[in-house]
Image (cartoon, helix red, strand yellow):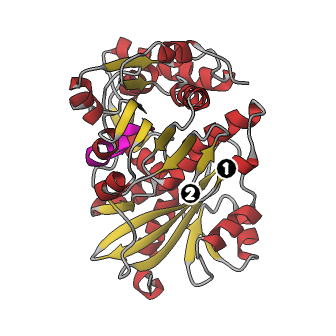
Amino acid sequence: MFEITTSVRKMLALDGKNKIIQGATSSGKTYGIIPILYDKALETPNTLITIVAETVPSLKDGCVKIFQDFMFEQKRWREDCWLGNPMQYTLPNRSKLQFKSFDSEGKAKASGKREILFINEANHVPYGIADALMIRTTKEVWIDFNADSEFWGHTELLKEPNTDFLKLTYLDNEQIPEGTLLKMLTRKAKAEQENISGQRGYWWNWWQVYGLGEVGSLQGVVFSNWSEIDSIPKEANKLGFGVDFGYTNDPTTVIMVYEYNGLHIYDEVIYQTGLLNSDIAALMKANDITKRDIGYADSADPKSIVDINRYGYTLKPVKKGADSIMYGVGIMQENAFMITKRSVNLRKELQNYCWAKDKDGNEINKPIDNWNHGLDAIRYLEMELKLNKRGKRRVRSFG
């Protein structure tokens, strides 16, 4: 049930044209901004509001879902007002909320003018695209983000006149779910312990960014040898795919692996909780995975592997040993690799997957057991490619 939280009240009090919302995780920033924007559209006829995220998948999983959940909960949703393509909701007073993603400055410029702009997770949107949208916005610009590190919101937008800055934390969100609050407090305790020991590390840095909403950067990340690529080149070759099964709390992940100019490219195909094996098979089919594409999954779940194969796929149990995690990590560290731009969850894992620490705060030769669902899927396939030396025989052209 939507309620006006402290976060919402603080955001409503902002009166500058530019509204910068720097928030910790679970602070309710996006969940508050969406209803605020809807009310603005309702109050003023013919208002165009553009809501932007880095990619279409992140837009659908984030702002669109939040908007639809809010509208259904408030019994305001009208199916005849919604267009799925393009994603746009038109109110009876002719105001519109449009949900968009832009992959170039040219497309952002061509989108025209609007009264209100909201850039969700703005630190993941390039400044050139953001600037092209902001300069064509006449009344209000809203941005929100977790401050993993300083970006154009700090270096550019904060310098502009008529700009408000607001920092929110989970304490501003009275609607935070009990389970989420418990996880936050557990992480806070870990951060405090690191601070007491005089060995500030992963959890201390994590708490600064996601608990307190401060600008920071996570230390001790396992992988720094990666970059992004817009899409899979037509000349790329499929090497196979990895699967990591999950259900309630952990997502099921399917990552397709390609080879291009000697480098591996990882493409996030599935990253979702609550999937039955039949759902996984259906999503694999929808993403053009066929029996010719050989995949590997954790041998600890043989029933799911057999079940998936009954749908016509070729999924095999990975050969695992006592040191399989470090073996797989070592393989992935050997050479630079790329991830596709649409692999937003995989990117978050790479940004947060860090070395664990012992009781004295010293890094140990073992990663944390977190932020690793997509990475585990990759590791399974990379281990098999290395161990079996059959990679080239399994390669087939993408085009």
How packed mark 1 is, by other alpha carbons closer than 10 Å (few <14, some 14-19, many 20 or more), is: some
- Tags 1 and 2 in contact by the CB under 8 Å rule? no
How far from the left and from the top, in percent, is residue 258? 41, 73
**Labelled disc at residue 216:** none
Q: Amino acid at mark 1?
A: Trp
Q: Give the spatial CA distance, label 1 vs label 2.
A: 9 Å
The quarter of the picture where residue 231 lies is bottom left
- Location of the N terminus (image quadrant): top right
The quarter of the picture where residue 269 lies is bottom right
Q: Secondary structure at mark 2?
A: loop
How far from the left and from the top, in percent, is residue 34? 56, 32
Q: Give whichever of 162, 295 is nearer the camera.
A: 162
Residue at (59%, 44%) from the top-left corner?
64
User: Viewed as shown, does residue 79 lie left or right of 47?
Assistant: right
Q: Give whichever of 189, 86 is nearer the camera.
A: 86
Residue numbers of the magenta segment: 118-130
How packed mark 2 is, by other alpha carbons closer than 10 Å (few <14, some 14-19, many 20 or more), is: few
**Which residue is under mark 2?**
86
How far from the left and from the top, in percent, is residue 264? 35, 69
Determine if the magenta segment contains residue 121.
yes
Q: Is residue 72 visible?
A: yes
Q: Secondary structure at mark 1?
A: strand
Q: Give whichever of 124, 375 is nearer the camera.
A: 124
Q: Amino acid at mark 2?
A: Pro
How far from the left and from the top, in percent, is residue 72? 75, 37
The quarter of the picture where residue 86 lies is bottom right
